[in-house]
Structure formats: structure tokens, C-alpha cells
Image (cartoon, rainbow, N blue to C red):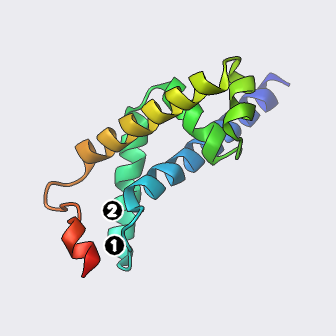
Amino acid sequence: MARNLTRELRRRNSRQYALAAEEAQRIITSGAQVDDVAAGVTERAAALQALARLSAADQELLTLVAWHGLGPGQAARVLGCSTATFSVRLHRARRRLEQAVDAVRPSHDPQPSATAKEH
């Protein structure tokens, strides 16, 4: 029985991690078109590395929204806090995720400039 519980916890954690990684990748690629398969793989690797740098609390906030699809009110109830508190925590977690992505992104892969997007 304990073995089954452990296996289920590992499976759930890996699903949460995968979905949080998708949220990280969404943040990385928002506004940018990824047409090259290699670029997509590189972006996913950067997202996974960035996610691994976050605290468990930040990962939980991101997975409540990305994986479970909860709205701010629902997620706040899960965490036992107010909707406003949850929204602030989520904003900060997303900001830390963006900073972590910038830290792990290869230096030879600059962000597309705003002018490049317009053309």
C-alpha cells in the first residue's frame, strides 16, 4: 500500500512539474514564433531549468493555474488565502520565473527586439 501511495505521489509530482514547465515555456515564447524544432527544444530546456530554480511554493502557484486550470478565487481557497494575496503571489512567481528564464537562456540567443517583431 505504501508503495502505491509513493508511486502515485511521484506520478502526480511529475505531471505538475511538466505542466509548470509548459507554463514556463509559454512565458518564454509569448509573442515569439518558434518555427525551428531545435529552437523549440532549446526553449523547453531553458523553461525546465528555470522552473527547477524556483521554490516549491512558486512551482505550486504556477501549477494551480497552469495544470489545474484554477482561477484566482479557486486557487486562493486551495491555499487558504485571499484572492488578492494569491494574485500578488502569482504575479511574483511569474516574475521570478521570467528572471530565472533570463538567467538560463543562452547568451548567444538574444530576445527579439520590439522593432524586429513589428517588421
**Amino acid type assigned to the residue bearing label 2 in the image:** Thr
Crowdedness of circle 2 by 10 Å Cα count: few (<14), some, many (20+)? Answer: some
Seen as rendered, the residue at the extreme right is 1
In which image quadrant can residue 108 be found?
Answer: bottom left
The total of numbered circles placed on residues is 2
Of residue 112 and residue 11, the one placed in the foreground of this image is: 112
Seen as rendered, the residue at the extreme left is 108
Q: Tell me: 40 left or right of 12.
A: left
Please give the name of the residue rendered at 38% of the width and 74% of the height, measured from the top-left corner: 33
**In the rendered image, which residue does mark 1 sit on?**
38
The Cα atoms of the two marked residues, 1 and 2, are separated by 6 Å
Question: Is 43 rendered above or below residue 85?
Answer: below
Q: Which mark is residue 80?
A: none
**Amino acid type assigned to the residue bearing label 1 in the image:** Ala
- Name the secondary structure under disc 1: helix
**In the rendered image, which residue does mark 2 sit on?**
42
Please give the name of the residue rendered at 56% of the width and 31% of the height, measured from the top-left corner: 87
Q: Tell me: 93 left or right of 16.
A: left
Q: Measured from the top left, where is residue 95 in percent x and y?
A: 38, 37
Crowdedness of circle 1 by 10 Å Cα count: few (<14), some, many (20+)? Answer: few
Q: Measured from the top left, where is residue 21 in percent x and y?
A: 50, 49
Please give the name of the residue rendered at 63% of the width and 42% of the height, measured from the top-left corner: 65
In which image quadrant can residue 114 be found?
Answer: bottom left
From the image, which quarter does the C terminus lie in?
bottom left
- Name the secondary structure under disc 2: helix
Q: Tell me: 89 left or right of 9.
A: left
Q: Are marks 1 and 2 in contact (CB under 8 Å)?
A: yes
Of residue 53 and residue 73, the one placed in the foreground of this image is: 73
From the image, which quarter does the N terminus lie in?
top right
Seen as rendered, the residue at the extreme top is 80
Q: Measured from the top left, where is residue 60 in percent x and y?
A: 58, 31
Q: Measured from the top left, where is residue 5 in percent x and y?
A: 79, 28
